[in-house]
Image (cartoon, rainbow, N blue to C red):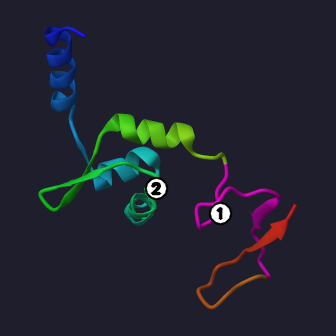
Amino acid sequence: MSANRERKEADSAIGERLLTLHEAAEILRLSTRTVREYLKRGEIRGKIIGKRWRFRRADLDAFFENAPSEWDFAGREVTGIRWCISENASDEAGTKGFWASV
C-alpha cells in the first residue's frame, strides 16, 4: 500500500467525529444504561477518552448489523418466547406483563 493511501486512511479515521455515550444511545434507540451493559459484555466497541466513553459511528453500525433480531434482557437470542402484556399481571414494580412460550 502506498504511503499516501495509508496517510489518507489514517486522516479520515482520525478526522471522524466521535460520539458521546448519550449520542450513541440515541442512535441505537437504547438507554445509556443498556449501552453501558453492551460495552461491559464487549458487544459494542468504544473507548474511554478523558474519562468519557466515545464511539465511532462505524462501530455502532457494526453492532447493529451483527445483533440478533431478538434478545432477552441478558442479551441472549430469544427463541420461542415473547413478552405478553396483561391487565391482570402485575409485579411489585407495577409491570403489567409476563414471558410466555410461543
Expressed as whole percent of the image width and height from the top left, the position of residue 53 reads 25, 56
* Distance from the alpha carbon under mark 1 to that under mark 2: 14 Å
Where are the magenta residues, as a range? 70-88
- The numbered mark at residue 72 is 1
- Taking the spot 67% from the left edge, 52% from the top edge, the residue there is 70
- Taking the spot 64% from the left edge, 60% from the top edge, the residue there is 76
Disc 2: which residue: 30
Does the stretch in magenta take in 75?
yes
Question: Could you tell me what secondary structure mostly forms the magenta stretch?
Answer: loop
Tally of marks? 2
Classify mark 2: helix, strand or loop: loop
- Taking the spot 76% from the left edge, 82% from the top edge, the residue there is 89
The residue positioned farthest toward the front in the image shown: 1
Image quarter hosting the N terminus: top left
Position of residue 79 in the picture relative to residue 94 (left or right):
right
What type is the residue that disc 1 sits on?
Asp
Expressed as whole percent of the image width and height from the top left, the position of residue 64 reads 51, 41
What type is the residue that disc 2 sits on?
Leu
- Taking the spot 16% from the left edge, 29% from the top edge, the residue there is 15
Q: Name the foreground residue: 58 vs 94.
A: 58
Position of residue 55 in the picture relative to residue 102 (left or right):
left
